[in-house]
Image (cartoon, helix red, strand yellow):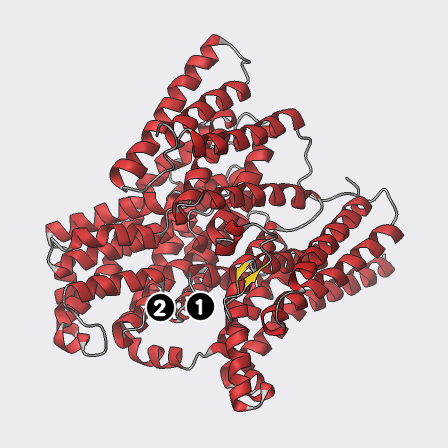
């Protein structure tokens, strides 16, 4: 992404967030809304500055740091799988969902591909991690975890 | 006093107490390293066990867990860019880049030595200067706290020198998001966007886990790297780091420890604020400022020395005034009360053996921590030898349980994922996760104290008098101005110098 594009996007995000909060804040009393309002104005002003900077700057300038090439498919599969995992945590239970997520997630990401040997390694890994988590959180620290249908 | 100190040392080396120190440290380090499990939680969980012990042994163990947990947070901050406790937020700034450069051992050992050093200095202040420092802490009212937060926020200018505006925007966004929930003044519901679950507000730890950890998972699994970073165990790594710190980090260690001790005394201000302020000061006074944020060992040292020094600091008002300086100090105070011991100045007269044994044991704890930590590091660093395909999903599982356990709320898990996406996509347009984290941490404290200061100004009839005439406030205002202006002036000076050099060429 070029610097120009990132400036414009950052400006837009900043203004949109500030406006959304501002609209919500209309119902609040002045005392309650004082600091948020100052922040909203600050974000709108800096957002406008970013938009202007983005529009007047030359297009080819280098983008932001940390923009290494990324395998979007792998990244998005894991993000989506995490949403499914969290839904599983609610409805099925933390430990069962964690076991399944670790098993399928590590198998999918494995560089050997979806082979049987990779699946076996993932099985050992997910059993071990789920077991350690159970030992630490449930047995030793007695921390409640979402139960769901199973546990 | 000397007699009591010697008795304290003797009590620390009684076999059962010494074993409790080692066990407490190991337990504390593990708790601290696991995201979501805080020092407060670790100490609180162990308080009931102390009821079966004599009070001295119980307190010694709680002190060991406290110290271990605050240090332990740096392990995950360095190895997987996830602060194990909020105190280690500033450790990620340089600890994680050091890991990516293949120097995880250097960062881990530096954090260990700095933590131990900070812990000892904080305890020495507790031992010898508790009374005057507690009096100074009492002079901190709401306006002083407000300016302290503003001083902390001024760090942003130094944090992202190449992109100050986006850094400030990130901090502003963090602060605005932190206003979600009930307001501190009237308890009115704010910015919930119709979602009732947001009434409880945005919890800091899930937001941190998301910003630093989940966003990093997206980078990890999307990259083609087989491992997080190159790591090969080197013999003598600990000695090498110790020599480096002795040679070039003495001032940094001392300055950060003093900052940490002082911030620790202030109720409500903890290791996260101490770490951030110390990091900023370390950067300001360092000759190689440009290295900070790119893997400077000095950054790790500053953050870790400061956050462990807050332990001694937070116990000063608790032991001398009966006012805990942190949530953990409050839990320890509860343990004291449960044993029938009333904290306050009289504790040093009525329960001298207990008070001094507890304080002196903290010195022993920090020294023993070095030996325990050096051995644990050898094991924990091996996490870098696990392929990213396994470590990525394991971090997600830890992040989910870590976020959930804070309030047993699935909303916090959603918050973690949301901030993970904000951290990742925000990073792509130049928003700074560190500055945003700072806004989320300091925003509520700043607003709370601003509201109280305004109420105070209403009662006194002068905003100017409340905000700008107290000596501590003035000092903090001056420090803030220096903090904001120094990077700008330095950038101008460098540009001028370069222009002159170019003209000559």
Whether B477 is drawn above or below B229: the answer is: below
Whether B7 is drawn above or below B366: the answer is: below
* Residue at figure coordinates x 60%, y 50% from the top left: B433
B6 relative position to B473: left or right: left
Question: Within the image, what quadrant is residue A1 found in?
Answer: top right
Whether B429 is drawn above or below B258: the answer is: above
Give me the C-alpha separation between circle 1 and circle 2.
14 Å
Q: Mark 1 points at which residue?
A: B259
Q: Is residue B487 visible?
A: yes
Q: Position of residue A23 (x, y in %)?
A: 70, 59
B75 relative position to B497: left or right: left
Q: Position of residue B263 (x, y in %)?
A: 43, 68
Question: Within the image, what quadrant is residue B261 found in?
Answer: bottom left
Count of numbered circles on the image:
2
Question: Mark 1 falls within which chain?
Answer: B
Q: Which residue lies furthest to the top in this view?
A: A116
Marks 1 and 2 share the same chain: yes
Foreground disc of the pair 1, 2: 2
Q: Name the residue under label 2.
A: B325
* Residue at figure coordinates x 42%, y 16% from the top left: A121
B111 relative position to A141: left or right: right
């Amino acid at each position: 992404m070029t610097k120009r594009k990132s400036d414009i996007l950052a400006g837009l995000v900043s203004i949109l967030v500030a406006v959304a909060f501002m609209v919500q804040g209309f119902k609040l009393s002045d005392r309650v809304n004082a600091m948020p309002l100052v922040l909203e104005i600050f974000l709108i002003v800096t957002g406008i500055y970013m938009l202007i900077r983005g529009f007047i700057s030359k297009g080819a300038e280098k983008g932001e740091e940390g923009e290494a090439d990324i395998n979007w498919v792998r990244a998005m599969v894991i993000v989506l799988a995490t949403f499914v995992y969290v839904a599983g945590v609610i409805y099925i239970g933390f430990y069962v969902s964690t076991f399944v997520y670790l098993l399928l997630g590590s198998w999918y990401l494995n560089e050997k591909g979806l082979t049987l040997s990779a699946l076996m390694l993932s099985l050992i890994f997910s059993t071990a991690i789920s077991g350690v988590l159970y030992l630490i959180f449930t047995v030793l620290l007695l921390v409640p975890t979402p139960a769901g249908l199973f546990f | 006093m000397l007699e009591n100190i010697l008795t304290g040392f003797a009590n620390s080396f009684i076999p059962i107490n010494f074993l409790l120190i080692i066990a407490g440290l190991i337990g504390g380090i593990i708790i601290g390293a696991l995201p979501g499990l805080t020092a407060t939680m670790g100490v609180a969980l162990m308080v009931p066990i102390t009821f079966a012990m004599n009070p001295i042994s119980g307190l010694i163990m709680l002190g060991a867990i406290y110290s271990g947990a605050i240090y332990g947070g740096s392990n995950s901050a360095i190895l997987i860019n996830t602060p194990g406790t909020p105190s280690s937020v500033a450790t990620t700034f340089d600890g994680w880049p050091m890991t990516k450069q293949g120097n995880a051992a250097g960062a881990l050992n530096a954090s260990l030595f700095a933590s131990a050093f900070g812990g000892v200095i904080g305890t020495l202040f507790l031992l010898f200067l508790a009374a005057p420092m507690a009096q100074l802490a009492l002079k901190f009212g709401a306006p002083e706290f407000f300016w302290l937060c503003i001083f902390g926020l001024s760090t942003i200018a130094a944090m992202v020198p190449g992109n100050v505006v986006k850094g400030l925007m990130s901090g502003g966004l963090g602060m605005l998001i932190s206003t979600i929930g009930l307001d501190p003044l009237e308890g009115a519901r704010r910015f919930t966007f119709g979602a009732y679950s947001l009434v409880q507000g945005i919890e800091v730890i899930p937001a941190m886990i998301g910003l630093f950890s989940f966003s990093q998972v997206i980078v990890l699994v999307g990259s083609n790297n087989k491992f997080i970073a190159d790591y090969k165990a080197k013999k003598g790594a600990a000695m090498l780091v110790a020599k480096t710190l002795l040679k070039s980090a003495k001032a940094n260690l001392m300055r950060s420890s003093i900052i940490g001790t002082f911030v620790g005394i202030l109720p409500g201000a903890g290791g996260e604020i101490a770490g951030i302020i110390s990091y900023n000061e370390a950067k300001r006074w360092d000759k190689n400022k440009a290295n900070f944020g790119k893997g400077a060992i000095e950054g790790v040292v500053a953050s870790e020395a400061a956050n462990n020094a807050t332990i001694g600091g937070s116990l000063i008002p608790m032991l001398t005034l009966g006012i805990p300086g942190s949530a953990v100090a409050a839990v320890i105070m509860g343990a004291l009360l449960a044993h029938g011991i009333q904290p306050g100045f009289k504790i040093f007269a009525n329960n001298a053996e207990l008070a001094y044994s507890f304080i002196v044991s903290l010195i022993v704890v920090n020294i023993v921590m070095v030996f325990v930590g050096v051995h644990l590091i050898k094991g924990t660093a091996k996490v870098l030898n696990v392929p990213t395909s396994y470590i990525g999903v394991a971090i997600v599982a830890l992040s989910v349980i870590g976020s959930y356990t804070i309030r047993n709320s699935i909303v916090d898990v959603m918050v973690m994922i949301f901030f993970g996406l904000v951290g990742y996509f925000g990073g792509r347009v130049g928003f700074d996760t560190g500055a945003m984290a700072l806004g989320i941490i300091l925003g509520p404290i700043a607003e709370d104290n601003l509201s109280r200061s305004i109420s105070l100004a209403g009662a006194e009839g002068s905003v100017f008098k409340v905000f700008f005439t107290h000596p501590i406030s003035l000092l903090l205002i001056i420090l803030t101005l220096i903090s904001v202006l120094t990077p700008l002036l330095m950038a101008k000076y460098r540009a001028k110098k370069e222009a002159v050099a170019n003209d000559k060429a």
